[in-house]
Amino acid sequence: MGFGCSVTVLLVFCLWGVLISVSDSTRLGSSRQKLEVNKHLNRLNKAPIKTIESPDGDIIDCVPISKQPAFDHPFLKDHKIQMRPNFHPEGLFEENKFDENKAKSSTPINQLWHANGMCSEGTIPIRRTKEEDVLRASSVKRYGRKKHRSIPKPRSADPDLVNQSGHQHAIAYVEGEKFYGAKATINVWEPKIQQTNEFSLSQLWVLGGSFGQDLNSIEAGWQVSPDLYGDNNTRLFTYWTSDAYQATGCYNLLCSGFIQVSSNIAMGASISPISSYRDSQYDISILIWKDPKEGHWWMQFGNDGTVMGYWPSFLFSYLAESATMIEWGGEVVNSEPDGQHTSTQMGSGHFPEEGFGKASYFRNIQVVDSSNNLKAPKDLGTYTEYHNCYDVQTGSNGDWGHFFYYGGPGKNPNCQ
Ligand SMILES: *[C@@H]1O[C@H](CO)[C@@H](O)[C@H](O)[C@H]1NC(C)=O
Ligand SMILES: *[C@@H]1O[C@H](CO)[C@@H](O)[C@H](O)[C@H]1NC(C)=O
C-alpha cells in the first residue's frame, strides 16, 4: 500500500511539474503552494491501519505506534520507545486519595470520536491534517506553530511587548525554585471567539531558562482555535518549544518530538462534555512530570490518569535539567478588530468574582519537587495585562487545595 501510494504521488508530482511549466507566473505560485502543501500532508499523515470518522468532522487515524511522526526525527531513529514511566509523582492530592471523580464531574470527560470507535493497542489515534487545515495557516512552514513569543512574563517591565503581541493572559505562577513537574484540574468551557485569527486557551506552562531567545516550554490544556482546527470546538492540545517559538516545536503531533503511547486519547481532538453557566461543571486533570531515571517529560491526562506519552529530554536545553517556572491560566489573542478590544472570551467568559458554576477555575494546582513529590505551590503569584478585560483570583481550601478563578468577557464598558 505504501508503495502504491508513493507511485501515485510521484505521478501527481510529475503532472504538476508539467502544469507549472506551461502556466503563467500567477498560476505558478499557487501550484507550487499546492505541491508544498501536499508534500507536508504526506509527511504528517501516516498510513493508518484503521480510520474513524468523528461526529465533529475530524478523521482519526489509528497509526502503528512505531510509525508516529516522532520517529521522523533524526535523533529518534534508534530510540527505544518507553511504554510507561519508571516513576510517578506521589503526593497529597493524588487521584485515589482525593475524590476528584466524585466532585462535580461524575461523567468522565470523553473525546467526541469515541462515539464511532476506538484504536486498538499498539496503535495511537492521530487527528488527520486536511488540506484546508494547512491552507488556513499563513504558510506551510507556520502550520501548527505559534506565531511568536506569547509567553506571559509576570512583572514584565516592557509594556510595548504587551501591546505588540496582542496576547493577553490571566495566570497564576511560581518561580525561584527547581521544578520537576506540575499538575492541575482545569474546568472545561467553550469560549466564544470573535475573529477566526484569534484563540482562547486554558493551560499550564512548564518553563525553563530565562525569557530570552532560548526559552524552553512544555504546555498542555484545552483550546478553541478556529485557524488551527477550522471550527469552534474545545480541544485537548499540547505544545513544546526549545527556542522561544522560533524554529523548534509545534502543537500536538504536528512535528517530530512528542512520543505518544496512549491508544485512547488523540491530541487536538474535541473534548466533551463542556460546562454550562449555572449548570453542570466538567474538568480535566493534566499532570506533567520529569521521570527521574530517563529524564523524559511525561504527560498524564484525564481523571482516570491516562498516560499520554513523553517529550524526550534531548529536545530541550534548560528543561533537560529542570523547570524554573510554572504557570497556569488562560490566554487569548486580542487582534483589536475595528480598533476596539476583542470580545473573545477567556474561560467561561465571566469574571472570577462570579465563582463556581459561572467563572472558570483551575483547582488542586501542584508542583513536583526534586524528590518526585507533588506539593502545594509556595508563594503563588498572579499576572494579567488588563484586569478589566480578563482577571484572576486565587484561593485555597481543604477540598480544592490551591485554586483560582480566571477569565472574562474581553470587551465591556471597562475594557474597550
Ligand atoms: C497599550 O496601548 C494603548 C494605546 O496605544 C495605551 O493606552 C496603553 O496604556 C498601552 N498599554 C500598556 C500596558 O502599555
Ligand atoms: C465560530 O464562531 C463564530 C462566532 O463566534 C461564527 O461566526 C463562526 O461561524 C463559527 N464557526 C464555525 C465553523 O462554527
Image (cartoon, rainbow, N blue to C red):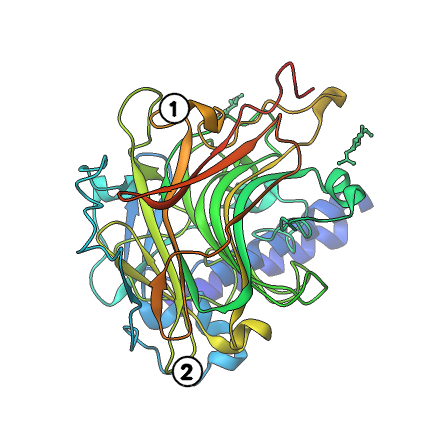
Asked if residue 121 lies left or right of residue 18, the reply is left
Q: Which mark is residue 23?
A: none
Q: Quadrant of the N terminus?
A: bottom left
Please, which residue is most extreme toward the top here? 413
How far across and down, in percent of the image, does residue 171 sit?
54, 43
Q: Position of residue 281 (x, y in %)?
A: 29, 30
Q: Residue at x 20, y 64 (%)?
A: 121
Ligand 1, by image quadrant, is top right
Q: Residue furthest bottom?
A: 78
Pick the quarter of the image with the C terminus: top right
- Under 8 Å from ligand 2: the CB of mark 2? no
Q: Which residue is rendered at x = 32% and y = 45% of the image?
A: 284
The picture places residue 305, in percent across and down from the top left corner, at: 25, 57
User: In the rendered structure, which disc, 1 or 2, sits on the residue that comes first in sequence?
Assistant: 2
* Residue 112 visible within the image: yes
Residue highlighted by disc 2: 79
Look at label 2 and name its amino acid.
His
Residue drawn at (46%, 32%), measured in percent from left and top?
A: 347
Q: Position of residue 43 (x, y in %)?
A: 51, 63
Disc 1 to disc 2, C-alpha distance: 46 Å
**Label 1 CA crowd tier, 10 Å (few <14, some 14–19, many 20+):** many
Q: Is residue 165 above or below residue 96?
A: above
**Amino acid on which the number 1 mark rests in the picture:** Lys
The residue identified by callout 1 is 358
Left or right of residue 411, residue 236 in this image: left
Give SS at disc 2: loop
Q: Quadrant of residue 50?
A: bottom left
The total of numbered circles placed on residues is 2
